[in-house]
Structure formats: structure tokens, C-alpha cells
Image (cartoon, grey):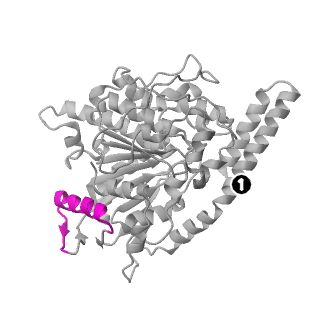
Amino acid sequence: MGSVTEAVKGAQIELAALTGPRAKAIRLLRLTRIFAAELLGSLIIIPYGVTALRVHRSLQPRQRSSSKPSVTICRDVPYATKPRTVMDIYVPSQTFHPPTSTTQQAIQNTAKTSGHHVSEQGVAESKQLPVALFCHGGVWATGAKWHYAPMAKQVAQAGVLTCVLQYSLYPDALAPQMVDELSQALTWTFNNISQHGGNPNQVSLVGHSAGAQMCAMALLHRAKALSKYKQSHEGSSKSGQGLAQDTQLPAHVRMPANFIGMAGVYDIETHYQYEYGRGVAELSTMKRAMGGRLKFPTQSPALILNAACGGKAQVKLPGLAESPAGGSGWGGRLAALGKAVQGRLPGFMAAPSVTTPNPTASRPPANPPAQAVSAPLNPAPAAVEPVMPFTLQEAEQLPPVTLMSSTADIIVPWHQSEEFHQVLQACSLATQHRVYHDRSHAGFVIDWTGPPLDSQEGWQNLSEYKKDLICKIRSPC
């Protein structure tokens, strides 16, 4: 409801800026269509909301569980002092049965490197489990941890201790505070997750949409702190990644084993241009949550990193500012759009020219062919705030990065992840970009209903994206 209220405020501001009754009438008509389409999209996902709430409520608290369910939950665990700075921890059983030969091999490899015992039947047992710390999206203005209960439960059934955090939202907080709260959640996880059976040396930071932007920004700030710590301890011969995994490090400078960003926003100005083309730039809370358009560069991980490597990344993308047909964005919630979305977004390329989703791929994906980038529809102001100072040495402290996007996503298009991927490559950092064709924007996090993953049927029906995500968390590479 808060995001709707803010969207209405944005519409009022936009209408007030127009001159002449005709211009206002035309814009009001388009806004009405957009609101109607968004309302329809919200109605479509009501059944999912009912399912998510039922799943969340059905899980037994860990301390009170008399039986042995596959997953129990610790609710509302505080990681900081603000009212919303709490997380739910989904605790899996200590044993599980890998379903497929591919996943089995990944688990076997993980077991060999992390001290797991693997029986002849393929049952992996461990005193400490791999951990996923998940940060939700929601235009920096909406979202609650129970919304993601189906995903968290299924990931936990795969043997991953899964933490779903929530954080202060706009208008009560701006993006920098949200980033700081996320970093506090990561620090809390390093300090406390072993008490819940998790391995603090095998924490994957996972973010979706706005949550992916927050994760990337939090890691940039922690990379600065880690680099400074390393400089003050010059006697250490470890590399940045080695230091990040050192259990003797202060928790506030430690890095996760890897970062997984799903359909994230990494260049705020570019995404604002895209939303402007769709007619939703002022309805979205993104600009206000950033503190205004002048602050966009300060919250754009792609720009900060590109400056750190001397602007080496010559990002080659299709026309970013072109307006998609329809303009309302409702189709992003419908997985049935699939590859057809490419025809609705002028200038978009087929994803195979970017990368082929493959969990075992070791070579970086090829860059897309050079194409002309359209001039901005609504040019950025000249006096924007500069990016924060960030060096290549600090960038080297970052963990390996896996980016996931989809050609079926018209809310945050795949080119946001591709730009960030190319910048990471230009800085010679470990990165992969996996592009899918069947994920809507919300589908990355809500398409997790179905048979439990601790059953053979559940694993057999698992999509490629889900297998990739789980294998990446279980065996960071």
C-alpha cells in the first residue's frame, strides 16, 4: 500500500509540472491506464500471496518442533535496532538426497572441500551448512520477508540455511540507510549464523531487483573497509579474497563467499531513462529513494566500479532509452511472455549472443555486438554528484559475482546486468552473467511453488534457473 501511495504522489507532482489542460488530460489518461494495468498485475499475483502467507505460517518454530520436518524457522531475529531490521532463518535438516547427477556432482565437490561426509547412497551430512542471505526488492519502498517463504523453504530443502531479511523502506529511509542496514545484516550473519548451524565461511549474499543494487553497494563499502584493514596489517600475505575468508577478521570487513544478483539495477540513471520511456519514471519511488536525481551516480555500482578501473569498460548495449510498446509494464509479471518480449522492446538482442546459461561454464560470456545507443529521452542534469572515491585495489577485495537476468523481464531488463558484468570484466574481477528466456521479473523469486525439493519429483521438475542458483550457493566458484 505504501508504494501505491508514493506512486500517487509522484503522479500528482508530474501532473502539476505540466502546462495546459490538453497536456494534463493526455498524461492523466496514460497514468490511468498504467495504474489500471498495475492493479491488474497485482490481482494476478494474489494467489501467490495467499500461498506465501500459508507457507510462512505453516512452518514450525525451530525450538518448538517435536517432529522432524524438512525445514523449521526462526522468525523475527533482530540483526540491528530499527523496527524492520529483522530476518527469518529457515533451517534445513542436516541430511538431504541430491536428485540429479549434475547436482550430485556439485554436492560431492562441495563435500570434498568443506569437510562434509558423503555416504555411498549420496547423502551429504555436515555440522555446518552453506548459508544464503537474501535481500528482497520492491522499488526500495515495499516488501516483507514472508513474501519469499516459498523460495526460502525450497532453497532450505536443498540443504541451504536460508536467511530472508527485511529493512527500512522509503519514505522512512533513503537508499544509503538501506544499504547500511543490509551490511549490518551481513555482519550479524558472520557473527551469529554458526549458532543456527550455518557456516560463516560459506555465506552467499543474494539480492533481487532493488535488493541486488543494495547488495552491490554494501559490498563496495565493505571492500573499502577491507582494503583499509589490509593496508593496516601489511604483514599479512593473503590476497583480498583470502582475507575475506579469514575468521580472525572483524566481521564488519568480511566478505561473503560470493554475490548473486538477480535482475538487479546497477546503473540508476540508465534505469531511470528506461522507466521514463515506459512512462513510469515519476511513479516509481526509485528517484525519491535515491535522494533525488543528482545522487544517482552515488548509488550506481556500475559507475563506481567503472571509475575505479579508469573507465575501461566501453559498454556495448542496444538502444537503452527506447520506449517499449504498451508502456505499462504489466507483462513483466507474466512468465507466459517468454521470448515474445524481445519483439516488444525495440533494439533488444537475442540473449544467446550475450551468454549461455550453464552452471559449469568457466569461460566468461562474449560481449554483445556493438550497436548505437540512443540519445537519452530525458537528459541527466549536468551538476550530478560524483561517484564515491573507489580504487582498483579496493575493487579487488570483492567476492566472485554471478548475475542473473532474463529476456522476458521488462521491469528491469537484462542489459542492466550485462552493463555491470562488462564493468566487472574490465576491472579483471571474477564475474558471470547468466541470461534466461523464461523468467519474468517477479518470477525469479515467486516461481518457487511445487513439490518439495527433498522429494525426487520436486528435483526432477526443477527449472534450470533454480538448479543454477542452488548449485551456486552450495558450491561457490
Q: Residue at x 61, y 40 (%)?
A: 343
| Image position, residue 369 (x, y; %) | 44, 28
Give the residue drawn at x 64%, y 36%: 324
Q: Residue at x 83, y 31 (%)?
A: 24
How many marks can you see? 1
Q: Is residue 177 at all visible to an observer of this figure?
A: yes
Residue occupied by mark 1: 40
Question: With 374 as the anchor, is 229 left or right in this view?
Answer: left
Q: Residue at x 44, y 62 (%)?
A: 152
Does the rendering let one see residue 389? no
Q: Main secondary structure of the magenta part?
A: helix
| Position in image of residue 460 (x %, y %) | 40, 68
Q: Say if the magenta span includes residue 8.
A: no
Which residue is the extreme one toward the right? 21
Foreground residue among 115 and 323: 323
Magenta residues, start to end: 99-120
Query: Percent position (x, y) of residue 409?
Result: 55, 45
Residue 7: image quadrant is: top right
Amino acid type, callout 1 = Leu
Whether 104 is among the magenta residues is yes
